[in-house]
Amino acid sequence: MTAHTERVTAGSVGLDRLTEIVSIDRGSPVPLYAQVAKCLERAIEEGRLPPGTRLDNEIRIAAELAVSRPTIRRALEHLVSKGLIVRRRGIGTRVVQRRVRRPLELTSLFDDLAASGQRPTTAVLALDVHPAEPPVAQVLGLAEGVEVFGIVRLRSAFDQPLARMTNYLPASLPGLSDMLTREALTRHGLYQVLAAGGIHLHAANQSIGARRATAGESRLLNEPMGGALLTMQRVAFDDHGRAVEYGTHVYAATRYTFELTLLSP
Amino acid sequence: MTAHTERVTAGSVGLDRLTEIVSIDRGSPVPLYAQVAKCLERAIEEGRLPPGTRLDNEIRIAAELAVSRPTIRRALEHLVSKGLIVRRRGIGTRVVQRRVRRPLELTSLFDDLAASGQRPTTAVLALDVHPAEPPVAQVLGLAEGVEVFGIVRLRSAFDQPLARMTNYLPASLPGLSDMLTREALTRHGLYQVLAAGGIHLHAANQSIGARRATAGESRLLNEPMGGALLTMQRVAFDDHGRAVEYGTHVYAATRYTFELTLLSP
DNA sequence: TAGTGGTCTAGACCACCGA
DNA sequence: CGGTGGTCTAGACCACTAA
């Protein structure tokens, strides 16, 4: 039932090319649904499945790729959640007309800049261990006076300062002092460094606001005196729900904005 | 195999109370997995399943509730994606220690304020139809000069002005002139009004920045002269990927911040 | 009416974890 | 080793949409 005798689905574009677009390796450790989703995702992003393209129905896709329907469904659900396709009962599945930028994820400024082709640089302004002051202890859920790592960095892109980033992490996290070196922090983003050390963040609450720059901030960020700053505070948690990082950052508002994509509930 | 003879799972708290927490109505039009997820979600939020609670394994939950394992899995996956529980192979499922505030969703300022108990009010400062100016036409994907609805609103909470919101919508959207009345916009949020008229938003790109207030903005928002403003621009799309709304808003930074929750990729 | 996606089931095998 | 979640299958029935 390879269904090649079926009429090409009307609408925009039919899909016998499916097998050209999606390749499956049953020996791979990566799950089938992930392989399917990844292939379709790439095809959509590269324009091989242009906006408005109608996809075959689930049954046919499953048959052509020789996997089960639930597996295909899982792949397609993933694409829906990323906003790449739209499905409607009785209608079918289409590639969305206008692509959302990206799903909102827990990433770092460094990664974002690097991904968008800018070459971010980092200067470590301070790096020490000290007793947590009350507000820091509180957001991290620590007793007052417990030791924390304090990090202050200046992040730049294209030789222009972009943000001053201040982070606190409980010193009790295992292996932290080996990870958090000036060298590592200069070369990589904080989250990269933590991930390399086996600390994986699970979720974060963040708060974005604005205020006027102090004189020192204006100088540091090369912004006009008293200009507007974007501020962001973030508390990140690991899998167990423990707070592992608190960051309070200021961004040069003339050169930086937060871009995000929201999907309907 | 109702498994009541099983030992209560060690760790934090066992669950024979499951049937007290989750009630299922097979006659309801709402899917089983959604019913299960909803019940567990409420139990977690109300503290009846406190942080750290260990849940029974999938097989046992399925047996106790008399549904299939995939159905239970689907419910639990939903809770994972909302950051309420954590699952690990070989370990089990636990309620997360620290709850994330809320998943990031496509909502309106009005809904957010109403949900958090503040009583938002709206003043409609302008409401008209006019030819789209070039920048507006471009972000909405319209030809220059095509007619658009223009809306300017002042949103307040507790009698304090909070934001000036400017929105543009293509006049070609069906039924728009019946929906967008001063009365409706005074009483409800824009997205509520659109939803009531059958226009459902699917995704949005938004950009958050900061700048200093103009003299007029300072007066309108009751902020200090030249103070910092939070700015947000948003383009929202419907299911077909057509841009249906463009908004450009300014917020009083001393009284408003964006709160959001990020989950790891 | 024919075709679509949405839901649900009952089972199977595997990879990972801790004791 | 036993227990856990992760993956995959092969079916079934239903609700919705368009012609």
Image: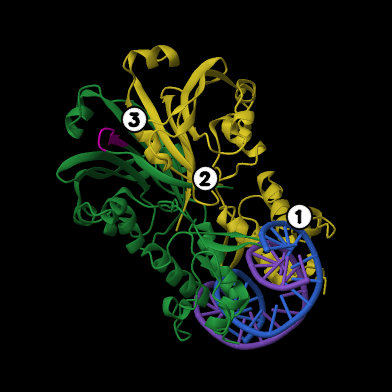
Chain colours: A green, B yellow, C purple, D blue
Please give the residue where the numbered disc 1 appears in the rendered image.
B30
For residue A185, above or below residue B8: above
Tell which tag, 2 or 1, sits nearer the viewer. Answer: 1
Q: Are marks 3 and 2 in contact (CB under 8 Å)?
A: no
Find the magenta span and give its range. Answer: A250-255
Write down the quadrant of residue A197 in the picture.
bottom left
Viewer-nearest residue: B232 or B16: B232
Query: In this rendering, does residue B236 appear at all?
Result: yes
Residue B78: percent from left, percent from top: 61, 58
Circles 3 and 2 on the same chain: yes
Residue tagged 2? B104
Mark linked to residue B210: 3
Q: Position of residue A238 (x, y in %)?
A: 46, 55
Q: Amino acid at mark 1?
A: Val
| Numbered disc 3: secondary structure | strand
Question: In the image, A5: left or right of B168?
Answer: right
Q: Tag 2 or tag 3, which sits nearer the N-term?
A: 2
